[in-house]
Amino acid sequence: ANVCRDLQTLADAGWVRKLENGRWAISEKPVALMKMYQLYMSDLAERGRNFEMRVTAQARQMLP
């Protein structure tokens, strides 16, 4: 009974879904969350590279 209640709670939150055959499956939500994190980290890395390039360009201008 506890497992069924817990699965229903997860389904209500969008983390799992009940299949037509009565079994449970993970929904797309956790995968989408992971993808969102990957995109965020990729953007953050790109911003870091851009910053590094600007710092390097400025440092080169300071050379005699």
Image: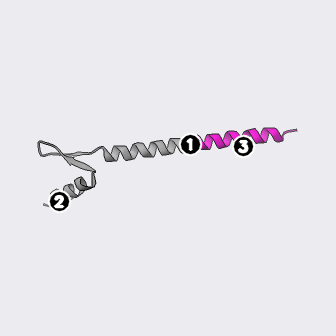
Measure how far apart labels 2 and 3 are at the Cα level.
Answer: 55 Å
Residue reaching furthest right? 64
Q: Disc 2 designates what residue? A: 5
N-terminal of the pair, mark 3 or mark 1, is: 1
Type of amino acid under label 1: Ala
- Badge 1 density bin: few <14, some 14–19, many ≥20, Cα 10 Å: few
Left or right of 29? Residue 46 is right
On the rendered image, what quadrant is the N terminus found in?
Answer: bottom left
Total labels: the figure holds: 3
Q: Earlier in the sequence, mark 1 or mark 2?
A: 2
Residue at the far bottom: name it: 2
Measured from the top left, where is residue 47 in percent x and y? 59, 43
Q: Residue at horizontal 79%, vertical 38%? A: 60
Image quarter hosting the C terminus? top right
The answer to whether 59 is drawn above or below residue 3 in the figure is above
Distance between the Cα atoms at labels 1 and 2? Answer: 41 Å
Label 3 – label 1 distance at C-alpha: 15 Å
- Residue at image location 21% in from the left, 47% down from the top: 17
Element at badge 2? Answer: helix
What segment is highlighted magenta in the picture? 44-64
Query: Relative to residue 33, is residue 62 drawn left or right?
Result: right
For the point 32% across and 47% down, which residue is it?
Answer: 29
Give amino acid for label 3: Val
Q: Position of residue 2 (x, y in %)?
A: 16, 61
Most prominent secondary structure in the magenta stretch? Answer: helix
Amino acid type, label 2: Arg
Instruction: Residue under label 1, please give it.
Output: 45
Mark 1: which secondary structure? Answer: helix
